[in-house]
Image: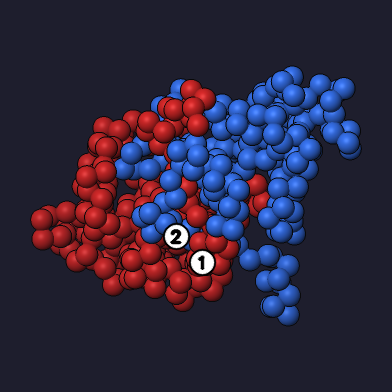
Amino acid sequence: MFNRWEDLCNVISLRPLLPAVGLPTPVLPTWCLILYFLDIFHNMDFSIRPATLEDCKDIARMLLELAEYEKVLDQIKVTQKDLEQDGFIKNPFFHGIVAEVPEEHRSKEGHTKVGYALYFYSYSSWKGRAVYMEDLYVMPEFRGKGIGKALMSKVAQLGLAAGCSLLNFSVLDWNKPSLDFYLSQGCSDITADMGYHCMRCEGDELEKLAQGGT
Amino acid sequence: MSNFILRKTEPKDVSDILRLIKELAKFEEMEEQVVLTEKELLEDGFGDHPFYHCVVAEVPQEKQSSDGYTVIGFAMYYFTYDPWIGKLLYLEDFYVMEQFRGYGIGSDIPKLLSETAVKTRCSSMHFIVAEWNKTSIEFYKRRGASDLSDEEGWRLYAIEKEDPLKISAKKR
């Protein structure tokens, strides 16, 4: 159970992940490196690492699985090529991490990449640097093994390393398993607590607004 | 009042931006939640990888506010990503000082931002509004915005880093 962000982060070296997000690598003490290796032994059945260009095919696959679960498959416009172009340029629009299992534990269809999280850096006019977790997904047959928690923990660690004091994300109100998971991690429902509603202006309405229409 | 300009913020604007952020937070009765500093605004908004972008509304000296300010409105935004539809523009804050409302400044700012969104190939502009803020909700709905929390059931979640002073106090 994570009661504080520091608990959620655990004590894992950020060294391997920081260069992937373009941040300077901090000098870490020996105790941190020892705990990093201990953590590797603890998590022998899966590993979390930064997403690469080659992972976009699997991310696109899992993205569609998540969209199907959220009943919005018809809304997907982004392709594998878009992910490659938008996530792996000099100033990427998002960052990704992937959960991978060894070959001998691959899925029924033969996949070893079994979960992912997409995140980007945002900003709170009250608190400053923030990180937004856009997607968090683990294939159904790999749930219950701590992979979701590990992915979210890694996003929190990366956010912390980048100087963020806030981690935000959105959940659909009917998604009870996810709501229960996030509340158990110490997250707050801002929509319920503060009455904040997510608003959107898109497509034709956005064009109309740009042209000065009301 | 037709003679106002909208322009990109410069480093010299950070004290005005923070002032306006606090005024907006005061309106939302959350002024004590603002812990951001001018130094952070400067570091985070003007480097190689800015965390945010900002536009300000400025009036000429002769039209300054009763407190002597010429920067009288602002909007803070950044680019986000939805892996279903691609790039988005996220509007973090948008505020015009009360004394300067009703002159079209509040309409021109979202217009400018949506132009920016279209130019940068964003498919959508997203933002948050408090459900009790009926005036703002009507303002945005008149301009074609939809309420995703009501219509699709999206709920915003947060987890915050605890204040390090609180943590060290607990450890004693």
Q: Which residue is mark 1?
A: A192
Please state the horizontal and vertical placement of residue B40, each as a whole percent of the image: 70, 43
Q: Residue at x 30, y 66 (%)?
A: A44
Decide: is B143 above or below A28.
above
Q: Quadrant of the N terminus of chain B?
A: top right
Query: Is A54 in front, or is A205?
Result: A205
From the rendered image, report the letter of the chain displayed in red. Answer: A
Cβ atoms under marks 1 and 2 closer than 8 Å: yes
The lab-note entry on whether marks 1 and 2 share a chain reads no
From the rendered image, report the letter of the chain displayed in blue. Answer: B
Please state the horizontal and vertical placement of residue B31, each as a whole percent of the image: 74, 56
Indicate the amino acid at tag 2.
Arg
Query: Is B154 in front, or is A16?
Result: B154
**Is A148 on the left or on the right of B41, as rendered?**
left
Q: Could you tell me how many numbered marks the image carries?
A: 2
User: Regarding mark 2 in the picture, which secondary structure is present there?
Assistant: strand
Q: Residue at x 37, y 31 (%)?
A: A204
Q: Which residue is mark 2?
A: B155
Q: Residues within 10 Å of mark 2 (few under 14, many from 20)?
A: many
Q: Residue at x 26, y 43 (%)?
A: A75
Q: Residues within 10 Å of mark 1 (few under 14, many from 20)?
A: few
State the mark number for residue B57: none
